[in-house]
Image (cartoon, helix red, strand yellow):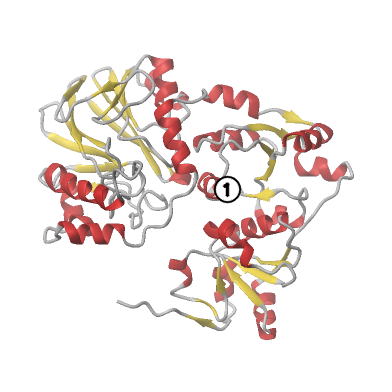
Amino acid sequence: MMKIEQIYTGCLAQGAYFISSNGEAVVIDPLRDPQPYIDKAKSENVTIKYIFETHFHADFVSGHVDLAEKTGAVIIFGPNANPNYDVKIASDGEVIKLGDVSFKVLHTPGHTMESTCYLLMDEHQLPHSIYTGDTLFIGDVGRPDLAQKNGELTTEDLAGYLFDSLRNKLMPLPDSLVVYPAHGAGSACGKNMSKETFDLLGHQKEVNYALRQDMSKSEFITELTTGIASPPAYFAENVKMNKNGYESLSAVMEKGVVPLTVEAFEAAANASGALLLDTRKQEAFAAGFIPNSIYIGIDGGFAPWVGALILDIKQPILIIADDGREAEVVHRLARVGYDNSIGFLKGGFDAWKNAGKEVDSIHSISATEFAEATKNGITILDVRKPGEYNPEHVAGAINMPLDHINLQMAELDKNKTFYIHCAGGYRSMIYASILKSRGFEKLIDVAGGYAAIKQTGVSKETIACSN
């Protein structure tokens, strides 16, 4: 009997797949920690025979290298992949047997030149489902700007390859085929992904803008390349790790999950130049934190924001976390290639405070207090994305997206008072913490963000969108 399981990780908007048949299993696009897949194979009494990689991922470090080492499974890439470790490079159209089912390899260049989809044929050799990686998403297709090579390929070239791949390899397949992509809404690998994590190919042909039957190649290239946000800096580094190999997760955890006394933590910070990363809840951070620490809460979009804002992936990191969550922080940093955690503050922020060490805070006000303050001509920074800001925002607010803080910070006057808000309070606290660490003192965070502000009836405006 064939069994398919989608293992979806919400904070990365990533889908891995565990598929088994007659005692054999394949894992497609695994996350970095191999243990859950090993445990699953043991509990289901199957042997992991293969690990399929759809391409060299940019937004997370895949678990293929560790998983293969621990299980003996064969790593399979499609054509054009050239990793620095042992793999099988499958040819276009090759059929790979797994128990009573099989997979047909479909080379689909465009998102990257090695991008490959895997078509699952059931026990009766009928097409059942397809694992599309970043070639085809639900509601979107993969961005074509990540695999340019020294001027040899342009974004437009890659978009053209993707058009051909979709039309020649995927769209002729049966409408009844289930599409299982590598990502969903929230991922930076596309621009219009659905919150759904799978769909029928026939439905995607009806609703996915990139699969319109009457779309010309030039129209496709124009639509696909318009409005792509710049990729986070860590994307290129993750591709290198996925292509060249990486340190085992167990080694990363061993050096990162190290409890440090207040004195040892302070000494390590001074000696290493480490970034102090505070992962507690935003309200706790606002009330008190170690000076110069940066807030990125573990309960929000943690890993993607780490990747977007900590520009040096090799940056040493010291962690301030809630008790018992320190290993989780190290683990989730490693998912996106931040492998240089060097310890955590034993006892957390309370230990620091009780030791009589210097502390800092960020003034946070309610939406009602903010609404009252707007009557006095204040400077408001709305740190949401333009797509959130343009439809509706507080009158007079300046859009300064958190994604661009490292580029736009020089535009801000340290002598001015800034009222900062996002949608719900998470991003604005990150923004305020970064400004604070750079010497900005006159910062006021609006708790609850725009969701709370709207309830006050504060004056708002919109930006008209031209056609």
Which quarter of the figure is the C terminus placed in? bottom left
Q: Where residue 93 sits: x, y (%)?
A: 14, 30
Task: From the viewer's side, name the closer residue of 89 and 289.
Answer: 89
Which quarter of the figure is the N terminus placed in? top left
Q: Where residue 201 sits: x, y (%)?
A: 18, 48
What residue did someone put label 1 on? 299
Q: Residue type at mark 1?
A: Asp
Q: What element carries label 1?
A: loop
Q: Where residue 98 sits: x, y (%)?
A: 22, 21
Task: From the viewer's side, name the closer residue of 233 and 357.
Answer: 233
Seen in the image, is 113 located left or right of residue 352? left
Image quadrant where residue 88 sits: top left
**Residue 207 appears in the figure:** no
Height in image: 398 above or below 358?
A: below
Q: Where residue 368 sits: x, y (%)?
A: 66, 76
Height in image: 352 above or below 339?
A: below
